[in-house]
Amino acid sequence: FAFRRTSLVVRDMDASLALYRDAIGMRVIYDNVIRTPREAKTDDQAERVSRLVFLRGNDDYIGVIGLLEYRKPLRPPRPARSDDDLRPGDIVLVFNLQNQQAVFDRARQVPGVRVGEAPNPVTYPSYDGTG
């Protein structure tokens, strides 16, 4: 089997697209407003409204990120945390980039993006335990 996509629930689709599409360079491959009931033609006629966007890097089938914004009813954000340490349940996304410094410079300019540290090379043993 192939693991194809991770979806992130976001508060602001335009702000999220500024990071993933504009700064990182992912390409939008799907962008749709989903209304429930499905026959609702406008947001006012719908009970629930969300926007779903899929972005991809350089592969057609793997490495896709879904961004899901709930518009109606609005959902409260998670409580703010007082530390930046990773905890169980947190998400870590890893990107292979051709021009890491340029992408980092664009990403840190996106409003709302908090930078914990500048990028640095990290190496791990290979899957077979060598190198």
Image: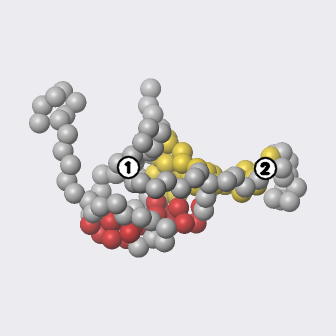
50 vs 8, left or right, is right
Place residue 14 in its image quadrant.
bottom right
- Position of residue 50 in the picture relative to residue 30 (left or right): right
**Compared to 42, does 47 lie above or below?**
above
Depth check: give the residue in front, 19 or 86. Answer: 86
Q: Considering the image in quadrants, where does the C terminus appear?
A: top left
Please determine whether, in this image, residue 101 is positioned above or below residue 32: below
Q: Amino acid at mark 2?
A: Arg
40 sits to left or right of 63 = right
Residue 102 % position (x, y):
30, 69
Question: At 49% across and 53% down in the image, what residue appears?
Answer: 81
Residue at left 78%, top 50%? 48
Q: Mark 1 sits on what residue?
A: 85
Mark 1 in CB contact with mark 2 (< 8 angstroms): no
Q: Position of residue 96 (x, y in %)?
A: 30, 52
For the point 76% across and 55% down, the residue is: 72
The front one of 18 and 92 is 92
Per the image, the residue denoted by label 2 is 48
